[in-house]
Image (spheres, helix red, strand yellow):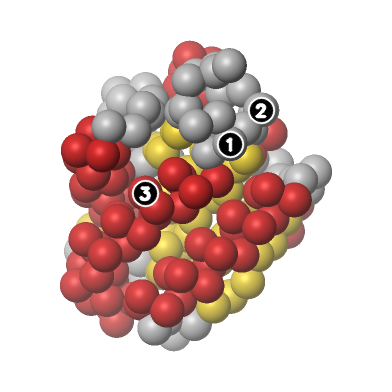
């Protein structure tokens, strides 16, 4: 029996800070959120692995060894025209029922907490990148697009609700971890 394990990751890192907007970067915002989550997971005694800020995505993805039943959650923010707003969850094109259920519940919960628009659950092939490596590792996996960094109101809400968001995302990691 594998130990219970989740893999929350900040997505971007020091060498690729992601989208820029509202005076910040995806890396800065998601590093903040990820660190709040890992503090909660530590306090709850939940076992996890996370990306280090100097690791590229391929180094992190090569280091972690999730198994069936583990949970991966990669954290991002969208970018677009100033008026674009809301939450999107991305899953693998081959996502199984656990990933799809986790995606829907996470989307609904984040939309409830932030009151931002729910933009739906989409497949990786519908994103500009077409394939997203971390979603194809073993285990249940989702990628969260937590509002638009290019939308000032989305970011006001993000900072206002960040503690509630962190708690909720940790609840999702725990609920969908089938190895506990
Ligand atoms: Zn990103």
Q: Residues within 10 Å of mark 2 (few under 14, many from 20)?
A: few
Residue 57 in view in this figure: no
User: Split into 4 quadrants, where in the image is the N terminus?
Assistant: top right
Determine if the C-beta at disc 3 is less than 8 A from ligand 1.
Answer: no
Label 2 belongs to which residue? 68
Q: Position of residue 54 (x, y in %)?
A: 30, 23
Foreground pick, 95 / 128: 95
Location of residue 16 by image quarter: top left
**Mark 1 or mark 3: whose residue is earlier in sequence:** 3
Q: Position of residue 84 (x, y in %)?
A: 48, 79
Residue at image x 46%, y 52%? 172
Residues marked 1 and 3 touching at CB (< 8 Å): no
Label 1 belongs to which residue? 178
- Side of 140 where 64 appears, left or right: left
Residues marked 1 and 2 touching at CB (< 8 Å): yes
Q: Residues within 10 Å of mark 3 (few under 14, many from 20)?
A: many
Determine if the C-beta at disc 2 is less than 8 A from ligand 1.
Answer: no
Residue at image x 45%, y 45%? 173
Give the number of callouts: 3
């Amino acid at each position: 029996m594998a130990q219970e394990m989740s893999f929350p990751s900040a997505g971007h890192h020091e060498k690729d800070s992601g989208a820029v907007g509202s005076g910040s970067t995806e890396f800065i915002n998601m590093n903040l959120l990820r660190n709040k989550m890992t503090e909660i997971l530590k306090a709850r005694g939940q076992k996890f692995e996370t990306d280090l800020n100097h690791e590229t995505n391929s180094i992190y993805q090569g280091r972690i060894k999730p198994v069936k039943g583990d949970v991966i959650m990669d954290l991002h923010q969208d970018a677009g025209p100033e008026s674009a707003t809301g939450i999107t969850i991305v899953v693998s094109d081959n996502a199984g029922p656990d990933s799809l259920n986790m995606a829907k519940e996470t989307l609904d919960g984040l939309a409830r907490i932030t009151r931002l628009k729910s933009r739906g659950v989409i497949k990786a092939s519908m994103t500009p990148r077409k394939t997203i490596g971390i979603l194809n590792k073993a285990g249940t996996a989702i990628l969260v697009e937590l509002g638009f960094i290019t939308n000032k109101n989305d970011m006001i809400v993000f900072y206002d609700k960040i503690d509630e968001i962190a708690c909720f995302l940790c609840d999702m990691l725990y609920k969908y971890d089938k190895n506990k």
